[in-house]
Image (spheres, rainbow, N blue to C red):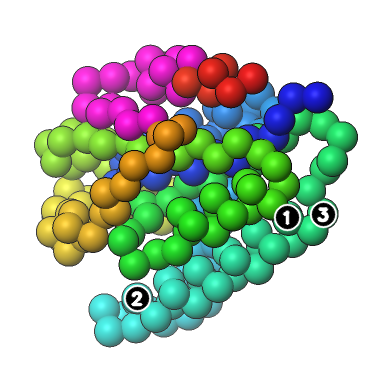
Amino acid sequence: MRKNQVILIHGMPATGKYTLGKLLEKEGGFLLDNHFFHDLFLHKVELSDENRDEYYGAVGHLKQQYIDILRKFYPKKSFVRYIFTSVMLKNETLLERLEKFASDIKADFIPIELTASKEVLEKRCQTEERKIRHKISNPNNMNKFLLKYKDLLPDYSHPNKLSIDVSDLSIRKTFNLIQKHLNNFE
């Protein structure tokens, strides 16, 4: 029987995490995009710069509960790719949570880190889909985000980790690199 996979696609906004997650989901995956959690209450609460981190911390607890549900009820007879997306900062425990989840269900844990230049992120953030999904879609807001969080990205090694600079790659080329990497675990 083929071993399940727990995939974490992480990187700055506009690197293509959600788009790539959707493509992987079409091939037998189960996508849990970070905006699934973050946007759940976003239009029903008031967020300010002072309470934004607290809100995202509370959402992190919700993610953990969701992972606990998956751990208990995951399908045991068929191949599943659990695909998580996240910006993922140093102070988050998502990496450890997902690694433990993968271990608990005897799946391969495969982190995929996406990077891009500041100029590319500024350009990519300006799409209509990003506006519709309430993502960063203004280059000025992207710059503020990068200034605030660029030093908080984790620097870690993992034997299954794939790092891709997507600055000069199309989504299709990036997806092909990811597929090739994932095929190493079959």
Q: Is residue 114 left or right of residue 1?
A: left
Q: In this view, does 172 lie to the left or right of 62?
A: left
Across and down, in percent, residue 151 comes to 17, 58
Which of the 4 image quarters holds residue 78?
top right
Q: Is residue 21 left or right of residue 68?
A: left
What residue type is disc 2 on? Answer: Asp
Pick the front one: 67 or 85 = 67
What residue type is disc 1 on? Answer: Leu
Q: Which of marks 2 and 3 is in front?
A: 3
Q: Determine contact: label 1, label 2, CB under 8 Å.
A: no
Q: Determine contact: label 1, label 3, CB under 8 Å.
A: yes
Above or below 16: residue 32:
below
Residue at 73% x, 55% y is 70
Across and down, in percent, residue 43 comes to 49, 71
What residue type is disc 3 on? Answer: Phe
Neighbor class of circle 1 (other Cα within 10 Å; few <14, some 14-19, many 20+) is: some
Q: Which of marks 1 and 2 is nearer the N terminus?
A: 2
Q: Which residues fall within the magenta stretch?
A: 162-180
Across and down, in percent, residue 185 comes to 58, 23
Does the image show residue 94?
yes
Across and down, in percent, residue 117 comes to 16, 36
Above or below 186: residue 47:
below
Q: Mark 3 points at which residue?
A: 73
Q: Name the residue under label 2.
A: 53
